[in-house]
Image: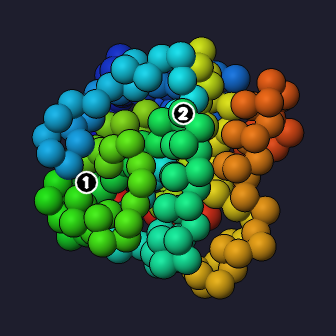
Amino acid sequence: MGIRTTMTGLGLALAAGAALAQVPGAPAPGFTINDTEGKPVALADYKGKYVVLEWTNPECPFVQKHYVSRNMQGLQKEWGDQGVVWLSINSTNANHSEFKTGAQMANWMRAQGAAQKATLLDSSSATGRAYGAKTTPQMFVIDPTGKVIYNGAIDDKRSANPADAKGANNYVRAALTEALAGKPVTTAATSPYGCSVKY
């Protein structure tokens, strides 16, 4: 007799949320995650603001590309100065060899000169799964009403070469520029590229 696998109600809800989060105009799943100092940060804390979620992993060459080139830090500062809340999320599971502690993540981000609002440790991977995050980096832009207005790649140069960050069509910058100007986002979803999220 075969073994049957069933999903709990919570599992179904998370799967539905992940599917929805990938559709522009869908509500962004709520979350509360501890930052690198162990303080809880909730998406609801930033209702009424634009929020960028950046899935990250220091071990990933594609993440390193955007930090070595200073592309990611530049975006964090550029949009932070305009009132956009930038949250970096590491969903590497606590049992994975690439997992980083709060201190390790804080030290790495400090060494990069990062300028995000907070770095969050999704060590259970629950939020990553709720969003259906597939790669590092993967980017989500959430509008002040709590809806996803962009989901996907950071740009159109699908490589790990830092030199390719310059001159790329940056989808996050384009989405925020249009949204803050009161315009609809022209490119609201793209296929993300990078390393797999280490669930």
**Mark carried by residue 158:** none
How is colour applied across the structure in the image? rainbow
Q: SS class of the residue under badge 1?
A: loop
Considering depth in this image, is 84 or 8 the residue closer to the camera? 84
Amino acid type indicated by mark 2: Gly
Which picture quadrant has residue 103?
bottom left
Q: Position of residue 120 (x, y in %)?
A: 30, 45
Q: SS class of the residue under badge 2?
A: loop
Q: Is residue 17 left or right of residue 90?
A: right
Which picture quadrant has residue 145?
top right
Q: Position of residue 130 (x, y in %)?
A: 43, 33
Q: Is residue 153 visible?
A: yes
Residue at 54 percent across and 23 percent down: it is 49
Amino acid type indicated by mark 1: Asn
Whole-angstrom CA distance, mark 2 to mark 1, is: 31 Å
**Which residue is label 2 attached to?**
83
Residue at 23 percent across and 59 percent down: it is 106
Q: Residues within 10 Å of mark 1 (few under 14, many from 20)?
A: many
The N terminus: image quadrant: top left
**Which residue is label 1 attached to?**
93
Residue at 40 percent across and 25 percent down: it is 43
The answer to whether residue 82 is above or below residue 164 is above
Q: Is residue 4 visible?
A: no
